[in-house]
Amino acid sequence: MPPMSSRPTEAAPTAPREWHAETAAAAIERLATVETTGLSRHEAARRLAQYGPNRLPPPRRRGPLLRMLLQFHNPLIYVLLAAALVTFWLEDYVDTGVILGVVVINAVIGFIQESKAERALEAVQAMLASRAMVLREGERHEIDAAELVPGDIVLLESGARVPADLRLTRVKNLRVSEAALTGESVPVEKAIEPVGAAAAIGDRACMAYSGTVVAFGQARGVVVTTGPATEIGRIGALVSEVATLATPLTRRLDQFARQITLFILGLSLITFLYGHYLGGMAALDIFLAVVGLAVAAIPEGLPAVVTITLAIGTAVMARQRAIVRRLPAVETLGSVGVICSDKTGTLTKNEMTAVRLMLPGRSLEASGAGYAPEGGFREGGRAIDPREDAGLRALARCALLCNDARLHKEESGWTLAGDPTEGALLAMALKAGLDPELEAAASPRIDEIPFESEHRFMATLHHDHEGHVFVLLKGAPERVLALCPHDASGHPLDLDDWHARMEAAAAKGQRVLALAQCEMPPGTTSLAMADITPRFSLLGLVGMIDPPRPEAIEAVAACHRAGIRVVMITGDHAVTAAAIGRELGLRAERALTGETIEALDDAALRREIEQTDVIARASPEHKLRLVAALQAEGRLVAMTGDGVNDAPALKAADIGVAMGLRGTDAAKEAADLVLADDNFASIARAVREGRTVFDNIKKSLLFILPTNGGEAGVILLAVFAGLALPVTAGQILWINMVTAVTLALALAFEPAEPGVMRRPPRPPGEPLITRLLLGRIVYVSLLMIAVAFAVYEWELARGSSIETARTAVVNMLVLGELVYLYNARHFTAHAFARDTLYGNPVAFWTCVILIGLQLLFTYAPTMQQLFQTTALDWTSWGLILALAAAKFLAVEAEKWLLRRLNVSSM
Ligand code: ATP
């Protein structure tokens, strides 16, 4: 019996086929789908179960064991491990145990925090899952790209990332950038004719491959393969960037760690030689002291603290609708000096409403709000009947037909699918009483030139049923007026008058669009750029408002207070832009236009850009020059963008910001930060969070370094002064184990400083450890040494045993660090507030645990044996507490002094 033939849908998609050598119709048939309606929901679900999700296997991650082992891969830890080995060899098992304790606690905390950080980053990346526009059951749907199946009909437009391997079935000026697949950076022109079976990937013009990006134009195609079966899946290329926890800052800190390790090793060697040969200490004793010194001095907790601080910042930003795509952005955000923002939708609400209609010889006011087609028209205060008004109807018909937006009535009101500018025009046409379906049936669209910001207009070709063919045109007035020798009533165009009317509307902040129409020879079936010549008749102008977002006005003010300049970049007319700019609180006496920018050389541009905050009629290429001009002044620049052509500017900026809702995949992939709500206020909040993160990393340094310095200083001083050690090596190791990672980690959770957004941005080149910071580190180290020795000498003087004196010193050091944690919560703001104790719950509970551990250390018999400690009496505690308080006040005094000198950050 012959084998049963399998159904075409099952054989085709998984096996690699030469789809490029088949016609589009053959591909569609083989995939058992319909080009005009797509798959049914049911069939799509069935195929999804059969072929699996359209997703590449995730990049292989390091296993937990390897990640745990990597925690030990750090020069600081090597030194500790070496010390543990030597103490073990010397049979000093307690010290070995404690050193290993330090290492293991550090590794475990590092491991846990790093996993959390990675999970936080992954969660954030998942928020950026890519979407695809498909046709199913005859309707367009935006779905998660992972749900695509072979046979789906996908719609592509410029800026979109191709979501699966597609056999193109329809293209309109389609050019695709295939760099991800072929390495070729110049976008490739696409077509639908099949090519030879032997054609290389780069030559298969009728295919669009997963992972490549539409640089221009529009298309429709049928999915032939998904997920791992796609070309990009087969070559195993990673499309998504791998999240990494390394940033310039962590690298700088790694370098710092290496330097400080070398320094500590050198210092330890000198101390050993001095103590042994000049101080006459026994080799074993001085060796153990030196081990204690090295362990005390090494800031082993630093890397973990920095990573977790950055990760916490990322999570906070995500909650505030700013999604970090690259971790370094978190720290860079803190020093942003200029934010360049798109106007429409970011600074404004992007809810356009047509308010003014300028017809030949007369003007009308439109009433109503939002996209609801409710309201009417008035001329000089008198209501008019649109059905009787031929001029208004002609304008409204053009607004309706040369338009791709749709309005839907839902329970919550009218919602728009499409571009807000077109939504406003559509609502206006509905108010004028036109019926979209009747009009579309009476004058079907045959072809179109879609809107692109570069040419600032859109044109559609229609025919009616009497054999007329005509073009409808709408776009920026200066483009359209230049194409109209006369107006709709046949009079030659009075350009000056129209410009004056346009500017009067623009000065009120209105976006003005011009609408026009022209007849074409009967039988014309296609529309090209060459057809857009000066032969149109002007139907009129429409002025629409798009009010600033109230929260954007506040955010701009907040940025100004924080010393950050805000520059508004818009495709709108200069007069409109300046009016909106003023409402937002920007410097906008006049706007700098794209045209002017083109005429200026780089030096002149740098001068001009200092004069105004508003850039109008700008296109993406101008953004690139603006970034360069602003950076040349030594500022860090954040730049927003949404289109495919914005990608270079987003990459060139120090922080590229893409719009999550409106943005194209190309823009999102080029960006460091994606705004989930497209809102300018979210950028300002992200900057605030970036500053907080940087502050917290500095606070961690400010805490860790002097505590290490103090502990190490105590030992150094004793050795060089020839004194008995005030703490044993084992004890100093204990202090390290219980404080190093725990206390410093608490500062990662510190909320923002009260004045974060009232100080100027951090200069980009500023070193991590500034002079002020260094001053504080030295000062606190000295205080630590002073109180430790004071307790030690006082205990000895009152006749306590050396064990008791040492126990007191250990408690002094720990308590000294604990109170210092509360000093360090603010750079210079005072700590005498309830909030100091309770404002950071992590700090509070860490301290409670620490006190418990110290009581064990002092009173538990096993601990007394292990660490040679003894119980302390009330007198000792009294002194320790008094000195801790004095030290606390001494640091507060320094902060007071800095406050008097107007220092608010370090
Ligand atoms: P912004 O740059 O502030 O975000 P935008 O991106 O909306 O604004 P563009 O889309 O580049 O600016 O629009 C520039 C100009 O093109 C507008 O001022 C308007 O005159 C015209 N325009 C905008 N949308 C359309 C459209 N759908 N059809 C025709 N012309 C349009």
Image (cartoon, rainbow, N blue to C red):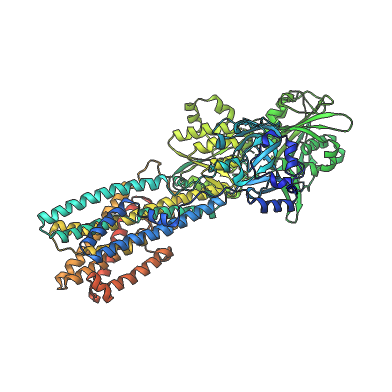
Classify the position of ligand 1 by quadrant: top left, top right, bottom left or bottom right: top right
Nearest the viewer among 850 and 434 is 850
- Residue 65 is drawn in which quadrant? bottom left
Q: Which x, y percent locates residue 545?
A: 68, 42
- In the rendered image, the vertical position of residue 280 relative to residue 11, given as above or below: below
- Residue 599 is drawn in which quadrant? top right
Q: Which x, y percent locates residue 630?
A: 48, 35
Q: Is residue 783 at least partly visible in the picture?
A: no
Q: Which x, y percent locates residue 129?
A: 59, 49
Image-based side of 585 in relation to 250, left or right: right
What is the number of callouts on the image? Answer: 0
- In the rendered image, the vertical position of residue 140 relative to residue 599, given as above or below: below
Q: Is residue 329 at least partly visible in the picture?
A: yes
Q: Which x, y percent locates residue 506?
A: 66, 36
Image-based side of 838 in relation to 894, left or right: right
Nearest the viewer among 185 and 886 is 185
Nearest the viewer among 539 and 58 is 58
Nearest the viewer among 570 and 103 is 103
Which residue is most to the right? 466
Which residue is most to the front? 1
Image-based side of 530 in relation to 307, left or right: right
- In the rendered image, the vertical position of residue 457 relative to residue 872, given as above or below: above
